[in-house]
Image (cartoon, rainbow, N blue to C red):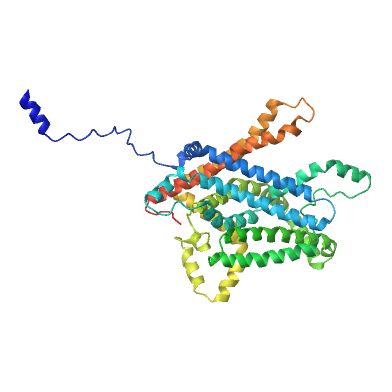
Amino acid sequence: MPGTSAASSSSPSAPPASPPQAAGRAPARLTAYSLPLHTFRVFGACALSLVLWFSAGRAVRAALMWAGTELAHGDYRQVRIVVTTLIFTLIVLNELVVMVGMLHSVRGALREIRVRRAEDEGADESLFGALNRTTLLFATIYLAWSFHREDAQEFISLDSMKRIDQDLQGSLAGIESEAGTILLGLDMRISAGIAVAAYILRTLFAWLHMNGRVRGGGVLTAFFELGLAFYGLNALFALAASRADWLDERAAVAAVKGWFEDLEKTLPWWKGFWEGVGDLWPLLVDALIEPLAWLAVAALVYGAFAEDTRAVVRGTRLETVADRVERTHALTRTTMSGATVGFRDRWVPPVHAFRLAVRGGAPLFGVFCLCYVALQVGADYADRSIRALVGSDFPFFWTLFSSPVEFAVDLVAGVLTACLLAAAFDIAATRSREAGQALTA
């Protein structure tokens, strides 16, 4: 009807239909039990960049190991070992660059980072900035918990395998073998001198980094910290080897040995107890401490907290003690800081990561450690299963194909581990933000 048409045309247009509720549905709430699913969600969003980072890191690692084992032998032996130890320092530092690169590449898949971007909280930090801030904590954790031992064992094993023919011929000719000495064959005076130089440079760049005087001061400080540790360990090993007989003859050493022997006779369970602790402790480190240490690195990459002691005790009854210590004399603070440096290096980052995990809910810590261990154990079983499935009917088959299989297994485990760390941080940070305590830099 005409009237109806006119009325319809003169009436205001109806608002557009709202989208279906399912299309505008809020994302599922992150919980501790959603950690495995969130890990695969992060992996699916950033798989390519993660694979590229891991592959590039393994290529650099292989090149450095090959160069180190090639340069370790020949004329001017001491100079070659100095260079080899320097290359090993770069191998360890490469582990940091790869881990930080993988963690940084998945920032866009984390809900916490997207919220920071929406609220303009400076979430788009450059890779170099994250690396510069993380290296110091990485060096501290890596050395305090002796994570570098696996790198050293792989380095030495590669050198021994490459020189197996030369060492066999040398042993038949009465020539002492050089296998296994590429990291410990340096003269004590040379290694001590280089360690002192590394200490001076470490202190200088640490001061420059703290005062913002040089770009990349954190990376350089960590590099010289690692150099100080490795050259210093070389010097200590050489000193202990040269003074072993002298130490055994000292009265104090003999008295301590006799005391322990008497204690074992008095307490028959004493020796068995410490043997059991020695067997259990590495498992606890692998299952609890190592995941927390890497979570601390991930949290620092995403700018979650400062790696100081006060941050660990903040919000607890120990904060009052820390306040009292801060009001003491400067000499007292310096003495306490020096006396507890070993304890702080080992325990402050894992404890802080534990508090971070607990913010995501009490079960998050257990689920996170369980997933971390499952990835490591699963990688070992996957390697064994592939070898058993393929078999070894052909001579020297695994000499050629062992490395590709190990690379494929390590690629899956390493990439998923990085995603697990990022997902655990994301859940803890999101739950903490929902509780009104944002974890920002």
Q: Height in image: 334 above or below 151? A: below
Classify residue 12 as left or right of residue 260: left
Q: Is residue 70 above or below residue 264?
A: above
Q: Residue furthest top?
A: 1
Q: Looking at the rendering, in which quadrant would you find the N terminus?
A: top left
The one nearer the camera, 43 or 69, is: 69
Identify which residue, 350 or 271, lies in the foreground: 350
Numbered label tally: 0
Most distant residue in the right direction: 173
Residue 297, image x, y percentages: 55, 52
Q: Residue at x 45, y 45 (%)?
A: 427
Residue 274, percent across and down? 69, 52
Horizontal placement of 20 versus 14: left or right?
A: right
Q: Does residue 147 appear anywhere in the picture?
A: no
Residue 125 in sight from this viewpoint: yes
Is 374 on the left-hand or right-hand side of 35? right
For the point 90% across and 45% down, the residue is 171
* Residue 352 in picture, x, y percent from top left: 51, 55
Outermost residue toward the left? 3
Q: Position of residue 316 (x, y in %)?
A: 46, 60
Residue situated in front as seen by the camera: 142 or 210? 210
Query: Which residue is depicted at the point 83% across and 55% down?
Result: 77
